[in-house]
Amino acid sequence: MKDIMGMMKQVGQMQARMQQMQEELAEAEIEGQSGAGLVRVTLNGKGDMKKIAIDPSLMKPSEAEILEDLVLAANQDARAKVESQMAAKMAEITGGLPLPPGLKLF
């Protein structure tokens, strides 16, 4: 019975740490870029786009398709960084224990 109580306490502590992590990630700003920095996208830790910066040299009607591709690439770069940061924080919380496949905690 004592083991179950100890385990429940640990689960409660983990939930509190996860809540804190989610709040920290929501406030984080992660930047991705493409085209050697000509396009920069900033996402929060939840993956929501907060800012986009486009170098004026790309604002030519004849280069619209290139610009669209660069925006997509910068967004994907930022999203990969968000996922990497989330994975690192989860490893801290879970002590490196793998979670079952398909288990989404946030």
Image: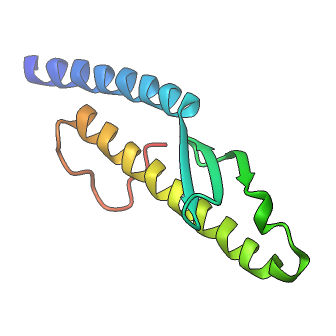
Marks counted in the figure total: 0
Q: Nearer the viewer, residue 68 or 44?
A: 68
Percent of width and height locating residue 14 = 30, 26
Question: Which residue occupies 9% across, 16% down?
Answer: 2
Q: How is the image coloured?
A: rainbow
The residue sitting at 49% across, 43% down in the picture is 106
Residue 43 percent location from the top left of the image: 61, 45
Q: Residue furthest right?
A: 61
Q: Which residue is at the front of the view, 101 or 45?
A: 45
Residue 76's image quarter?
Answer: bottom right
Residue nearest the viewer, comparing 49 with 106: 49
- Establish if 58 lies above or below 9: below
Outermost residue toward the front in this view: 57
Residue pictured at 61% horizontal, 60% vertical: 75
Tell me: residue 20, above or below residue 40.
above
- Most foreground residue, 67 or 103: 67
Image side of residue 60 versus residue 70, left or right: right
Left or right: 78, with 53 as reference point: left
Where is residue 74 drawn, in percent x and y?
59, 62
Picture quadrant where residue 8 is located: top left
Residue under the point 72% across and 50% down: 52
Quarter holding the N terminus?
top left
- Give the answer, above or below, for where 20 lies relative to 85: above
Q: Position of residue 46 (x, y in %)?
A: 57, 43
